[in-house]
Image (tube, rainbow, N blue to C red):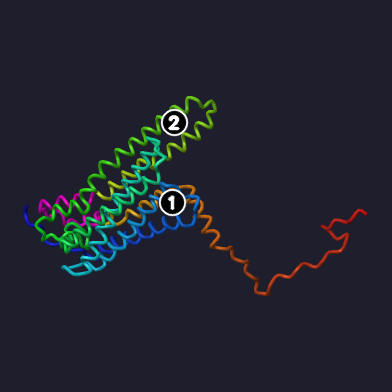
Amino acid sequence: MPPPAPPTELVPSERAVVLLSCVLSALGSGLLVATHALWPDLRSRARRLLLFLSLADLLSAVSYFYGVLQDFSGPSWDCVLQGALSTFANTSSFFWTVAIALYLYLSIVRATRGHGGLLLWAFHVVSWGVPLTITVAAVILKKIGYDASDVSVGWCWIDLEAEDRVLWMLLTGKLWEMLAYVTLPVLYLLIRKHINRAHEALSEYRPILSEAHRLQHHSSMADKKLVLIPVIFICLRVWSTVRFVLTLCGSPAVQTPVLVVLHGIGNTFQGGANCIMFVLCTRAVRTRLLSLCCCCCPPQAPAESPAGPPKAPAPSKPGDAGTPVDPR
């Protein structure tokens, strides 16, 4: 394997963009957690899985923020700590993203609803347990450390001086990332195909065209969101994979500023993207958020005139203009 390219230097503008992405992702993840806590009636099992994904994305955004802010120039204890936290959170985010797709597939296509509790526990064991085991092993074997920003954007990950660094890069993220590139589109395409078939079968028994049109509108909106989930995931994560391949090839293109910024945004903005899709683009949640904001902002009282508060009008006498007289 060729030696790695020289360290990638981060300019202040690139660091500022990635830090902003971390902040927006943390805010988006926090908003998802807040909506889950505020409205119990919205706590479906799918949104509970989204809650755990948001917690992983929140931890990922915070750890990346610290790494980019520090911009490590060499190995240190906080470099290892930050690398371990981001490795665990990032890998867990991959597993929870796939878990949501798998749950939707089993619930919609396979109609598997009787073992939801057992399935949820299995997701917890895999999505938290596997990343934790890999991260602990990487720390004990001293594989996490300074990576010269060639496979990151200022944060620490796998030490590029390790002889088996490629193996550990795969185990601590890249393997699961590339598997998600394949798994997510396949699962969501199967879900969409099933929904389209069910809608076609239902439309044959819908004599009222207006009702059928309304159902078609709602199903088409759901189809668009299903398509966007894997598309957004791939668009955000692919830049990290590109820089990983370039690093293995020893190519100087790994230091391209545009590629560095896209990598930084892609790895840190997953929580913000999920917030846009599942909060801002979900009518039920968006409506409640707007109502909450309106309740928190009471209307302002009318401004008083310089002459003082308005006086009450004098009582009018019967027979005055504009005042009805009792006919009795």
Residue range of the region highlighted in magenta in the rendering:
238-263
Find the residue positioned furthest to the bottom.
307
> Quick one: label 2 or label 1, which is nearer the N terminus?
2
Which amino acid type is marked by label 1?
Leu
> Magenta stretch containing residue 251, yes or no?
yes
Image location of residue 92, percent across then percent down: 29, 53
Find disc 1 in the rendering and name its residue.
280
Q: Secondary structure at mark 2?
A: helix
Looking at the image, can residue 129 be seen?
yes
Q: Residue at x 22, y 60 (%)?
A: 136
* Tag nearer the camera, 2 or 1: 2
State the quadrant of the C terminus. Answer: bottom right
Image location of residue 194, percent across then percent down: 38, 32
Up-down relation of residue 152 to residue 77 (above or below)? above
Find disc 2 in the rendering and name its residue.
199
Image location of residue 156, percent across then percent down: 20, 62
Along the viewing direction, whichever of 313 and 76 lies nearer the viewer: 76
Looking at the image, can residue 147 be seen?
no
Q: Residue at x 42, y 30 (%)?
A: 198
Q: Spatial distance from mark 2 to mark 1, Cα to Cα? A: 26 Å
Q: Secondary structure at mark 1?
A: helix
Bin the neighbour count of mark 2 within 10 Å (Cα to Cα): few under 14, some 14-19, many 20 and up: some
Q: Main secondary structure of the magenta part?
A: helix
> Residue 6, located in which quarter of the rendered image?
bottom left
Numbered mark located on residue 86 in the image? none
Along the viewing direction, whichever of 205 and 16 lies nearer the viewer: 205
Which amino acid type is marked by label 2?
His
Q: Residue at x 18, y 59 (%)?
A: 138
Horizontal side of 234 relative to 40 (left or right) equals left
